[in-house]
Image: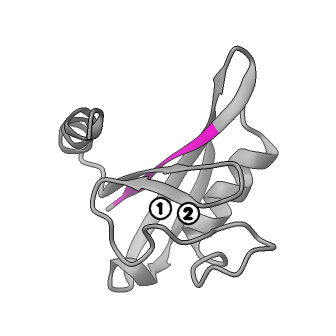
Amino acid sequence: KQYHPKYRSILYDRNYYDIFMFDLEGNLIYSVYKELDYATNFAVNGTGQWKDSGLGEAFEGAMANPDVITVIDWKPYGPSSGALASFLSTGIKQNGVLVVVFCTQLP
């Protein structure tokens, strides 16, 4: 609740569709809009329904290369009613240690 107003403001200001945070196990722990993908797992070896989606690719890309921005091209995304979506993701570090994956969904 503390950060939600700030992330919602960033979403509106930059015309993102959604903003996500993942823990390092691939669990979607934050979303501005909390669609069907919220609180599910996106790790490639996990059991989440959407792990093979563009957002799953974005999570895996950020885990593999957390110091760069991973770009996932436009494709249908189920939790957003199948609308075309592109994702940008990167790792967030604290004191040099990866702590979360940050991702945005473009409309």
- Regarding residue 62, the answer to whether it shows in the image is yes
Its colouring scheme is one colour
Q: Is residue 75 left or right of residue 17?
A: right
Which residue type carries mark 2? Asp
Residue to which mark 2 is pinned = 73
Which mark, residue 86?
1
- Contact? badges 1 and 2 (CB < 8 Å): yes
Q: Name the residue rendered at 45%, 78% in the picture.
A: 77
Which residue type carries mark 1? Ser
Q: Name the residue rendered at 31%, 62% in the picture.
A: 107
- Regarding residue 68, the answer to whether it shows in the image is no
Q: Residues within 10 Å of mark 2 (few under 14, many from 20)?
A: few
Please say whether residue 43 is one of the residues in the magenta stretch: no
Give the main secondary structure of the magenta stretch. Answer: strand
Q: Name the residue rendered at 33%, 56% in the picture.
A: 18
Please say whether residue 105 is one of the residues in the magenta stretch: yes
